[in-house]
Image: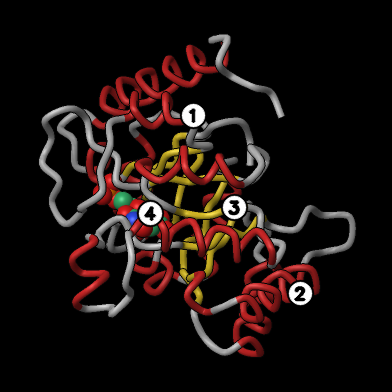
Amino acid sequence: MNKNPLIVALDFPDSEATLEFLAHFSGEQLYVKVGMELYYKEGPAVIETLKHQGHHIFLDLKLHDIPNTVKSAMKNLAVLGVDLVNVHAAGGRNMMEAAIEGLEAGTKPGAKRPSCIAVTQLTSTSEEMLHHELLIPGSLEHTVLKYAELAHAAGLDGIVSSVLEVPAIYSILPHSFLTVTPGIREFGAAKADQVRVATPRFAGESGASGIVVGRSITRADHPVEAYKRISSEWEDAVNERKNSSAFIKH
Ligand SMILES: O=C(O)c1cc(=O)[nH]c(=O)n1[C@@H]1O[C@H](COP(=O)(O)O)[C@@H](O)[C@H]1O
């Protein structure tokens, strides 16, 4: 993953709507995320189109199945030549190891294997939901930390969590381990279905490796302005943090 990207979630119904949105950026190469909505409609063709336009791609299909199935599916995803893919850490260590094996098997000779990250607990999950619906006791942070440790032990490149858990993750894992954080909202903006949210500035101050931003940009009246405003808030905070004496280089 390139340094501290702002990843734009292309949560659109089809290629047409996606390309219409990207046209606002007049050829600028972005880091984009293709999720289930778009991929299940358009399949590999949309990945080809986005690659052709020069965008970096996070293919967010959140695999969660038995190890053998995940391994075979990841082999097929690696063939697409995307930059980043993901699984649910709740699938367990064997499943995450199988994901890496599949990606290695599917990566073309000489090409870089896609990075693979594990969703710890969705940013739409609250601690109350964790206890009463998922029946996981203890604090939400503790669960995220345990899943992050498991993902690290399985050889994954990082995790997805909310910004709120990032400092705790880096108290136990190296800074080379990626923390990709959705649930980003500008100050005062509506949370919608997200629970564990943070501003772009707080994400940068907390040491997140990257942020994922969807509706705040894709549904904005002026998407390019929203993108620029959010990315400069994020990048300024990242740079201030790196320049501060408290930042330890790993
Ligand atoms: O894996 C993800 O990208 C993801 C994990 C998570 O815990 N929470 C989460 O919101 N996401 C994705 O990040 C994006 C957030 O969208 P907005 O809430 O519109 O900014 C969506 O595409 C989600 O699918």
Residues at marks 4 and 2, CA–CA distance in whole angstroms: 29 Å
Tell me the amino acid under the disc marked 3: Gly
The mark that comes first in sequence, 4 or 3, is 4
Determine if residue 21 is in view: yes
Decide: marks 2, 3 in contact (CB < 8 A)? no
Tell me the amino acid under the disc marked 1: Glu
Check disc 4 and report the residue beneath it: 141
Instruction: Rate crowding at label 3 as few (under 14), some (14 to 19) or many (20 or more) other CA atoms within 10 Å.
Output: many
- Viewer-nearest of labels 1 and 3? 3
- Viewer-nearest of labels 2 and 1? 2
Point out which mark residue 101 bears. Answer: 2
Tell me the amino acid under the disc marked 2: Glu
Quadrant occupied by the C terminus: top right
Camera-side residue of 19 and 34: 34
Residue 244's place in the image compared with 221, above or below, is: above
Residues at marks 2 and 3, CA–CA distance in whole angstroms: 16 Å
Could you tell me which secondary element the residue under label 2 belongs to?
helix
The mark that comes first in sequence, 1 or 3, is 1
Residue 55: percent from left, percent from top: 55, 42
Residues at marks 1 and 4, CA–CA distance in whole angstroms: 37 Å
Check disc 1 and report the residue beneath it: 28
